[in-house]
Amino acid sequence: MNCPYCGYYDSKVIDSRDINDGVRRRRQCLKCDRRFTTYERLQPTGLFVTKKDERREEFSRDKLLAGIRKACEKRPLPSRAADKLADDIEAGLYRLGKTELSSVVIGDMVMEGLKRLDHVAYIRFASVYREFTDITDLKREVDTLVNGEPVTTPSSQLPLLPTEKLEELAKRRQGTRK
Ligand SMILES: [Zn+2]
């Protein structure tokens, strides 16, 4: 990791701390002496995603998170809710123990997660993912939500924490990371 200030390639670690899902390192640039922080997380390799058009690409947590964040934009959710959902889905995917998965599997997991998290975020995601072609499709999906279709949990996915618990977690995490 190059220094974000001067671009120098080398730095020394002045503090290292385990966080839930990785390691946080405080570094000091060997050239300009300025300090910056890096986060290291385990990235198991070899999970590929097959898209609808048969293209194949490496699974990207960043892309998954970006999709979830976009759906949750401006929704009254705890700041870490999207990250938590991405973590749960990522963990669920690796637990399946496969090296290749259809993007549909991931999309369905996101749908299930968002359905429990926030109905507006769910509809936003669904309208893109399911490619609603007209208002009738959208209405049907909303009606299903309103009428309280029983929520089915895929066995591969962790049950999501209730919102209060998420908020509490988010607060605690923010507190310890500052
Ligand atoms: Zn520097």
Image (tube, grey):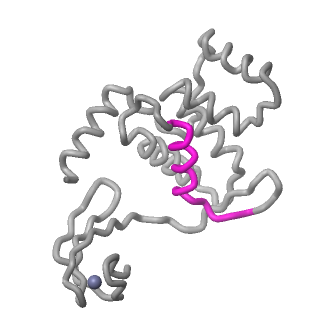
Nearer to the camera, 14 or 8? 8
Q: Where is residue 145, by image quadrant?
A: top right
Q: Left or right of 48: which side holds 79?
A: left
Q: Residue at x 32, y 26 (%)?
A: 164
Q: Residue at x 50, y 36 (%)?
A: 72
Up-down relation of residue 59 to residue 91 (above or below)? below
Please state the quadrant of the image where ligand 1 appears.
Answer: bottom left
- Asked if the stretch drawn in magenta spans residue 65, the answer is yes
- Asked if the stretch drawn in magenta spans residue 20, the answer is no
Q: Where in the figure is residue 101, as x and y percent of width and height?
A: 68, 54
Numbered range of the magenta stretch: 56-72
Q: Where in the figure is residue 5, as x and y percent of width and height?
A: 31, 78
Q: Where in the figure is residue 149, as x and y percent of width and height?
A: 63, 15
Q: Residue at x 34, y 33 (%)?
A: 166
Nearer to the camera, 140 or 95? 140
- For the N terminus, give its image quadrant: bottom left
Up-down relation of residue 82 to residue 21 (above or below)? above
In terms of secondary structure, what is the magenta stretch mainly?
A: helix
Q: Residue at x 27, y 65 (%)?
A: 24
Q: Left or right of 175: which side holds 57?
A: right
